[in-house]
Amino acid sequence: MKKDEVNNNTKNFGIVFSIFFFLLSLYLFYSKSDIYYSLITLSAVFLMISFTYPNLFYYPNKFWMSFGYLIGSITTPILLSIIYFILIFPIGMLLRLFNKDVLDKKINQNDKTFWKSSAKLQTNLEKQY
């Protein structure tokens, strides 16, 4: 990665976490909790650091991205398996149960050709422009 990309990435990391802590402090403020003072301070510190010394967030950003890749590698197969077994597998079983050939893969040996005739187009395709 280039140095500018690292600076932008770490700066964005600091800004995003600053916004997160600010929104969390607003929630705690409206729920009458006293912790919101420290979260507002933490949000301001993160915002100042992200604009003045963004390289301080290099290692936390690297850890956070690694954690995200780990979570993604765990949840993606689980979600895709759930989608497959809830949506695709039952549809395939129902199509087989009712002998439906959606892709028209059955071959009729009595036909001379396997060509499927299409509807004729009304326009002239030789002179398109």
Image (spheres, rainbow, N blue to C red):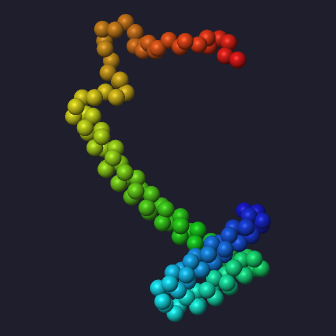
Q: Residue 85: where, in percent of width, then height?
A: 31, 49
Q: Quadrant of the N terminus?
A: bottom right
Which image quadrant for residue 4? bottom right
Residue visible at 34% across and 44% down? Answer: 88
Which image quadrant for residue 106? top left
Residue 90 visible in rendering: yes
Q: Residue furthest bottom?
A: 34
Q: Residue 58: where, in percent of width, then height?
A: 68, 75
Does 78 appear above or below 47? above
Residue 60 visible in rendering: no
In the displayed structure, does residue 109 sit left or right of residue 59? left
In the displayed structure, does residue 87 sit left or right of residue 7? left
Does 81 appear above or below 7? above
Does 24 appear above or below 110? below
Which image quadrant for residue 74? bottom left
Residue visible at 43% across and 61% down? Answer: 75
In the displayed structure, does residue 47 sit left or right of residue 21? right
Q: Quadrant of the C terminus?
A: top right
Residue visible at 26% across and 39% down? Answer: 93
Q: Residue furthest top?
A: 112
Residue visible at 31% across and 50% down? Answer: 86
Q: Residue 103: where, in percent of width, then height?
A: 37, 27
| Total numbered badges shown on the rendered structure | 0
Q: Give 114 or 21, whichever is nearer the viewer.
A: 21
Q: Residue 46: where, in percent of width, then height?
A: 67, 81
